[in-house]
Image: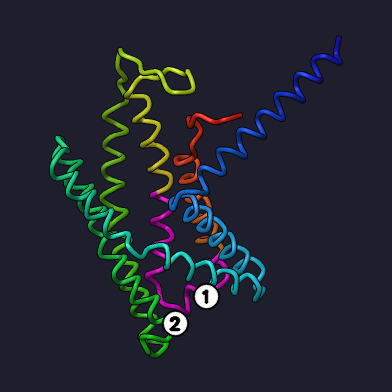
Amino acid sequence: HPVPFRRMAAVLDVQTLKRLWLQAVLFQDTLVGRDKTTRLFQYLARFLSGATGREVFQNLLAALALSRKTLRFGRQLRLARNIRDYCRHEQDSFDKVTSVLEDGSFFVYCFWDHACFAQRIRLLPLSPEGTDILDRFTEVFWITEIVPGMFREIRAYFRNLGGGSSSVVALNGSSAKPSDARRNRAKQLILKLCCDLVCALYFVQRAAWRNQRVPKAVCGICGAIASVVSIHMNWPRDAVLDL
């Protein structure tokens, strides 16, 4: 009879929505969750600003960009711990070097980003030309963060193409080979880092070029894609939930 099946589908839909809701609560309770969500809307605002030219989207972009700068205060503490752990525990020398370069670049980036924040609140008085130079110089360290990570993930992808014989069981009951899981993670990170690189190259250009609508829209799309990938990778889908 179709009625019981419809009721069953409705119950499953309710359970799915409830699970997504509780997972979203867990995700938004983390700094990563709030940062990546804000990043998604920031780059969507950049795309809409470029696509429509409307001031409201530019204002939203500026507000979200400034708010994300506040989330980077104190990030150096965790980055320093990550670098220490890479040096102590990473056995693969290539992964160790690229990971240290990646987090070390972000470590430096955060300090220069604090200077950009000081300029935004007028604590650091700079001319428009000086502000443009500071912003572009800061983004160079985003590029030096992206490139080592990209080399590491490309290498990881090709190293794990052969697969392996053993499998691991995830919390959701699905099984996957460790090499498959690492290859899938590498694919996702390569996509994210490629989109990030487009954005970083956009940001090191002069302000007059960055403010053109087409480059701004392209950067917005790439940044939004990278944000969606980050949200997908950090989503707590395997968390134990009280349904």
User: Dominant secondary structure of the magenta stretch?
Assistant: helix
Q: Which is in the foreground here, disc 1 or disc 2? A: 2
- Under mark 2, the amino acid is Ile
Residue at which label 1 appears: 211
Query: Quarter-wise, where is residue 156 in the image?
Result: top left
Q: Secondary structure at mark 1?
A: loop
**Percent x, y for residue 148?**
25, 50
The circle on residue 121 is 2
Give the left or right position of residue 60, taking residue 85 as reference: right
For the C terminus, the image quarter is top right
Q: Which mark is residue 161?
A: none
- Residue 47 rendering spot, x and y as whole percentages: 58, 62
Residue 217, horizontal then vertical, whole percent:
56, 63
Tag 1: amino acid = Asn
Which sits in the foreground, 111 or 25? Answer: 25
Q: Residue at x 42, y 39 (%)?
A: 188
Marks 1/2: CA–CA distance: 21 Å
Residue 83, given in percent of the width and then of the height, sits at: 20, 50
- Residue range (magenta): 193-216
Residue 68 drawn above or below residue 32 = below
The image quadrant that residue 57 belongs to is bottom right
Front residue of this view, candidates 242 and 3: 242
In the displayed structure, 62 sits above or below 198; it is below
The answer to whether 2 is drawn above or below residue 120 in the figure is above
Instruction: Identify the residue shown where x is 31% and y is 46%.
Output: 150
